[in-house]
Every structure is written in C-alpha cells, then in structure tokens.
Image (cartoon, rainbow, N blue to C red):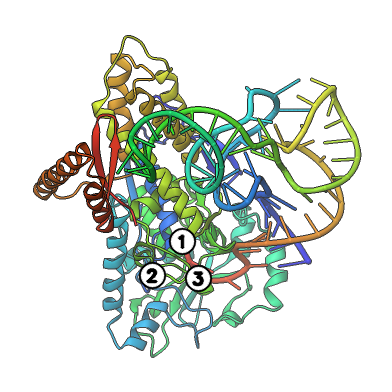
Amino acid sequence: MNQDLFLYNSIGGQKVKFEPINPPFVGMYVCGPTVYSDVHLGNCRTFLTFDLLYRYLTHLGYKVRYVRNITDAGHLENDADAGEDKIAKKARLEELEPMEIVQRYTVGFRHVMGLFNMLPPSIEPTATGHIVEQIEMVKKIMEKGLAYEVNGSVYFDVIKYQEQFKNYGELSGRKIDELIAGAGAEKRTLEGQDEKRNPVDFAIWKKASPYHIMRWVSPWGEGFPGWHLECSAMSTKYLGEEFDIHGGGMDLKFPHHEAEIAQNNACCNHGGPRIWLHSNMLTVNGKRMGKSEGNAFLPEELFAGSHPLLTKGYSPMTVRFFMLQAHYRSTLDFSNEALHAAEKGFKRITDAVNLLASLKSGVASDFNWKQWESEVYAAMNDDLNSPVAIAHLFEAAKRINSISEGKESVSKEDLERIQYFIPVFLQDVLGIRNENMAAGNEENTVDGLMQLIINLRNEARFRKDFQTSDIIRDSLKEVGIQLKDGKEGTGWEKTTS
RNA sequence: GGUGCUGUGGCCGAGUGGCUAGGCUCAGGUCUGCAAAACCUGCUACAGCGGUUCGAAUCCGCUCGGCACCUCCA
C-alpha cells in the first residue's frame, strides 16, 4: 500500500489519487452482465479492466469488497410492444421459465470469466434477489418527493431533483435543457412516455402488463423494478451510501450511471461512489462490438478460431494479454493481425519467465533491477497503465535472455528479487496463467517420452544420419511439437496453432 | 443537431513541451548439418495547414477524417 495509485475519475475528468474512505478496506461496485444472452468479448474487456483493478488493489494490500451484480430482471426492450422485459421476452420465445434463461446464461458467464482467469467478485448479487431493497428505495425516494406514481408505475422526477441537487448530467456532461429539447424529435416513443411529467424522467418501478411474466407485488401493484434501480439498491446495501469505486462500460455512463447517482442522492443524500471508472469499447474494424451491431465475437468462437473474421484460434490467456496491451480507457481494435502479434509477444514473455528459475547469479547486476521494478509500479499507479507495465516486462525478458546466455550478469540479491516479483506480477496482478502446465503426472510421462525421442534424434544427428533426424523433427512438428536445438541441448514446446 | 473522445511508422499500441515506449511484421547478422527457436542490428512515425515557444507528436486555432454517447448494449 506504499504506492500512490492514481485513477481517472469520470466525474471531473482527471486523475485523482486513490484514497479509500476506510483503509485498508475498499468498496468497489461494477455493473455486471444482463443474463439473457451469451457474453461477448466486448463485455469481457470491461470485466477484465476491473479484474485488473481488483487484483492490483489486492496486491497492494487493500482488503477489497468487490461487488458485481447479475442483472436477471432484464431491462426493458425499447422497441418491444409495450416495453417488454428482455429476459421475459427471451423466455417467452423459447418457452422457458425466465429463471431458466437466467440460469443458463449466468452459468455460461461464470464459465467464460473462469477461462479468462478473472477472479470471482466477493459478492455477486442478483436483481431478483433484491426486489425488497429496491422497493424500499422507491419508497424513500417518494418520501423525499422526488418520484411520483402514475397508474401503478413510479417515475423519478428529474426536474425536481435538479432543483435540489443541481448535479444531474454532471457525470455524462449532459444538460437537462438539451435532453428535453432532444427528447422530442426523432426519438422512439417509449412506452409510458405520456405518463411522465417530463420526458427526461425515468421509471424506477414499472407496472407489469397482464402478459409480463416477471412481476412482483409492490405498494403500487404488481410490477418490476426500473432500469437503473438495482445498482443503486445493491451498492448501497453492500458497500454503503458512500463507497470508493464504481466501474462499468463507457456505454453505461448515460443514462444508467447518471440515473444511479440521482437515485442515490434522492434516497440517501449521497451520490454513492467517490470515483467513477469507465472502460472503453472493444471495436471490430473500428466499429464498436455490440449485440445490436451483429459483430459480437463469442469467446468460444475466438478460442476455436471459428469466427469468419478469424484465421485461427487464440487461447484465453493470449486474448487476456492482448487486451492488457491496450489502456482500458482507449478503444481497442480487434483483428487477426493484432491477435497474432499479441500471441507472439505473449510467448516471448512466458518463455523468458520460464527461464527465470535456471538463471545463475553473478557478482553484480548490469541492469538496475530495482529501478525497473519501481517503473513497473509507476505504470500501474498511473491509472492502471498495463500496456506500459507490459513494455517493461518485455525489457525484463530481453535482460533475462541475455543473462541466460551469459552475456549479462545479475547479482544474487537482484536475481532472488525478480524470481519472486516477475511471476507474482504476471500471475497475481495481470492474471496471466501459465497455459502450458498440463496435469502433473501426464506431464512427467510426456517429458520422459520427449526426452527419449530427442535422444534418438541426437544420436542420428551424431551419426550424420540427417534423413532420420529430420523425419523425427518434421513428424513431431506435424503433431504440434517444435524442437529447439540450442547450445545446451535440445528443448521442445507445443506450438500454438 | 448536441456532447465528448480520437487521428502515431506495414500492423497493433504507449507517450502530453526537450532525454522521442514496447510488441508484431520486414530486412541483415550470430548460432545451427540444414531449419526452427533464441539473440543482435536496422527500419525514427506522430492527419493537413497555420500559430505560441529557444524547442511541439505533445499547447492554441482552423480544416479534413474516425469513433462513442444522446435509445437496450460492457
């Protein structure tokens, strides 16, 4: 924790020093998935951003309570007849219980998170599990006179809120007047629009139409919670009225997060988090990857290489590494070439790390490893600049290779330090797992077999029977094993493609 | 139309006033029976035009692109 971490706060638009409200405890809330369809890679990028932050904070010694919700009471479909709930709609189409839909995609979501080596949050609350809390919040907001009921629905009174708090639009840089002016023309007519006192008002409780499957009893009749309410209710419940960090995708800034702030203020006189973090979009050919764009990659398609835009598959850790090579606030463009470059680079680093254990120390270091380490931290402390941190890892890889070849020397002290630090940083902070680690016993068997084959080939080479040695080498290559002849003998590895 | 972000070498992608990341690709080399791998070396870019400055990719202005949000979306 002796590191000064700076994070870019979306409110205020500048990097601020991170100082928890109650150190060493940190409360972090992240908007999770809506479980009515498969997570795609764009979603994964956002969760990766906050996985990195969670890991880094933990690494620094903070005790983090990481809350990431599961939205299982789907948001309203904007174009559905009469505003249907997404999950309910999907359930109706597939003739399933809504909770079957929710279960299927929740399981899928967690599976994918696991493949990417994302740590599970401390709490993963569901919207449907917190209807009571949401109803309570609606009540409180109504008591403050900042919401009104019409025909069994409750709307948040944005105009009235603004008179009191004067901060609506602060996060997203929006002005209410403009929102009102823009809300009329060329907008789709949302269901219930005519019930609102003002077009900028939003529902915090919605009356369920007769065919709406997901519904709960409330003081205003049977209905379901509004689009933005769950995050306000659950963050308040688990992290308090004021907490440290709230994260989510850039696309949620408005209206979702703006509404969240307003609800929190209206209910509890506090806007919730101190710092808002927003991660940028993953793009494909410059266009945002999204469900509605039809260009979303499923993680499985990526791993298998079955997507039309891909020439081959890439492993989860390659993809993770690829994503970490871009800063979280920049858009990241997804392409074969970029992935391929990341795969090569990733291998370069892991190869060097695998050499660490076998390095021999010398009298003194030819390189300032202490400073190097502090530069890695400096990068991370600068708003989680993982690309720069990784650039430093490449520098380290270069040095490690030199040391390994005897061209450079490292002191005992430095060597012990990096033998500890580099794997820890890679695994604990960046969350990069060694994919080549097969199951223990099998690994030994394979190693033994490989050693046998290598010895046979080297005997052939010694006899200058290159025909035989090349057959061995080429046949191995066909089954995905690459031999590596070096000064100190022959090694091998599985090829990536 | 409004708001915001952005335009970096063949590709990806850092960098915010001078010390000008990093990876991939490509070329040359070392090593090797030959390859592969590894290593070394090389490739010096910041959309255009103008301005500020001793000095700008970095600040300002204009022009031209691109993107995002304004509507469910991470």
> Tag 1, which secondary structure?
helix
Labels 2, 1: one chain: yes
The quarter in which the N terminus of chain A is drawn is top left
The residue marked by circle 2 belongs to what chain?
Answer: A
Give the Cα separation between the discs numbered 1 and 3: 10 Å
CB within 8 Å, label 2 to label 1 = no
The residue indicated by pointer 1 is A42
> Tag 3, which secondary structure?
loop
Labels 2, 3: one chain: yes
The residue marked by circle 1 belongs to what chain?
Answer: A
Classify residue A72 as left or right of residue A259: left
The residue indicated by pointer 2 is A306
The quarter in which the C terminus of chain A is drawn is bottom left
Q: Closer to the camera, A149 or A20? A: A20
Give the Cα separation between the discs numbered 2 and 1: 17 Å
Looking at marks 2 and 1 on the same chain, the residue that comes earlier in the sequence is marked by 1
The residue marked by circle 3 belongs to what chain?
Answer: A
Other-residue count near label 3 (Cα within 10 Å), few / some / many at <14 / 14–19 / ≥20: some
Other-residue count near label 2 (Cα within 10 Å), few / some / many at <14 / 14–19 / ≥20: some
Task: Determine whether B72 is above or below A262 in the image.
Answer: below
Residue type of the residue flagged with mark 1: Gly
- Name the residue located 30 percent from the left edge and 21 percent from the top edge: A417
Residue type of the residue flagged with mark 3: Asn
Residue type of the residue flagged with mark 2: Ser
- Where residue B64 appears, as percent x and y from the top left, is 81, 59
CB within 8 Å, label 2 to label 3 = no
Instruction: Look at discs 1 and 3 and give the one toward the viewer.
Output: 3
Looking at marks 1 and 3 on the same chain, the residue that comes earlier in the sequence is marked by 1
Mark number displayed over residue A170: none
